[in-house]
Image (cartoon, grey):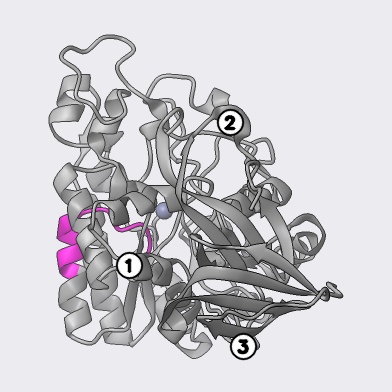
Amino acid sequence: MRSKKLVIKDGNIIDPSSRTNCIGDLIIKNNLIIDVIPNSNQTYSDEYEIINAKNMIVSPGFIDAHTHLRDPGQEWKETISTGSKSAAKGGFTTITSMPNTIPALDNANIVNDLVNRSKTDAIVRILPIGSITIGQKGANLSPMNELAEAGVIGFSDDGNPVSDSNIMKQALTYSVDLDLPVINHAEDKKIVGKGLMNEGIVSNRLGLFGADSSAETVMIARDLILAENIGAKLHIPHISSSSSLHLLEIYKNMGLNVTAEVTPHHLTLNENWVYGKKGEVPDYIDNESYDTNAKVNPPLRTISDANDMAKGLSDGIIDIIATDHAPHSDIEKQCSFADAAHGINVLETAFSSVFDLYLKKSISMDRIIESLTSRPAEIFKLSKVGGLKKGYYADVVVIDPKAKWKVEQHKFLSKSSNTPLLDTNMNGKILITIYDGKVIYKDENYNV
Ligand SMILES: [Zn+2]
């Protein structure tokens, strides 16, 4: 516990939960926020430790509703410890553990083990998501009540869809009394078939099997119909296509209790990144013409889809940004496109990726921060996080909007570095991350 008080001074405090966007001081005592002073010219005594945040953005710590920590079972990709350090570097103070661990988070014992190990191994808050079906096999429901009592904040078989409509119907029905969202990885496997990427010109040129976005939209349609009939809370993960967004908008306008997330990569990258030329379209194709780090599920789609996702997020049809942080080791990506694992390592690049949308005037800074803080806190009913109000946990991130940096493999705190953004220049950088009143991350160039 901190004995002194901490002041984050003269920053641009942006807290959408209290509609605050001002220059001011944020005061922390022990692990709580005790005051926000706009337009402050106050001086502070020695009992205060001061962080000068002039020209910086001061935001609530980010919340990631979709993190794959790989622990237990695949610790060569990531662990609770490395995943939480990676989160801190990316400005995230609350992350989730998706249940596709080995074994899956499908009973209270495994969830309790994760929660207990998180207390010692993690430097940020980790919230478990329980699996919908036992072993994520899609056949028999997990003990959802027991999982809820163990503290899961939602249910998902992510990585796998719940293909059986009656199982999905049952899960949604049970979720009503538990008042927790069901998060179904929306993918019709029959439509995907052998598809490895988005179907279109790029898949044709590369000679790779493609699958079109109807694989996603068909399953979202089914889930919306079921959720409406049952009155359940449906949360749609990693929405990626214009047709899915259109459907979501229709159901939201009908008043359905549905929410959705989008990843930084579906907002800012597109299928051209599969060429391995950082989004450029090559004149000719050779044996080196693909980047397995751009293989992800759902796949990167068209430029038009990505632009629609940004507009959907800006308009609030899509509620939140979630990373779908999916670490994989080099060996799982240094292979043919068909053999490569699906997934992108996102936590450390997430903010800078979406900051680009702000620089391009596609979305406001307040909306970006809302979608990373107060809105996920609302959806998952997290108390005293996601805002900078008096009495809230002192989870804070200080961002340098003018900083430029390069994504370098050797600087990852994650155990993996599988991202098509390697060697890409980025704008906007996380400078300091504070969790529960403690500074848990400082940028290497921090000298304010
Ligand atoms: Zn998924």
Q: Is residue 270 left or right of residue 154?
A: left
SS class, disc 1: helix
Which residue occupies the foreground of this view, 5 or 347? 5
Q: Nearer the viewer, mark 3 or mark 1?
A: 3
Q: Which mark is residue 165?
A: 1
Residue type at numbered disc 2: Ser
Q: Nearer the viewer, mark 2 or mark 3?
A: 3
Q: Which mark is residue 329?
A: 2
Q: Which residue is mark 3?
A: 390
Residue 15: % across, % down: 47, 77
The image quarter containing residue 92 is: bottom right
Residue 215: % across, % down: 23, 51
Q: Which residues are magenta?
A: 236-247
Q: Earlier in the sequence, mark 2 or mark 1?
A: 1
Q: Earlier in the sequence, mark 3 or mark 1?
A: 1
Q: Judge whether 360 appears above or below 295 on screen.
A: below
Q: Quadrant of the N terminus?
A: bottom right
Residue type at numbered disc 1: Ser
**How crowded is the residue under tag 1: few (<14 C-alpha within 10 Å), some, or many (20+)?**
few
> For the point 61% across and 33% down, which residue is it?
411
> For the point 30% across and 46% down, which residue is it?
268
Q: Earlier in the sequence, mark 2 or mark 3?
A: 2
SS class, disc 3: loop
The image quarter containing residue 19 is: bottom left
Residue type at numbered disc 3: Lys
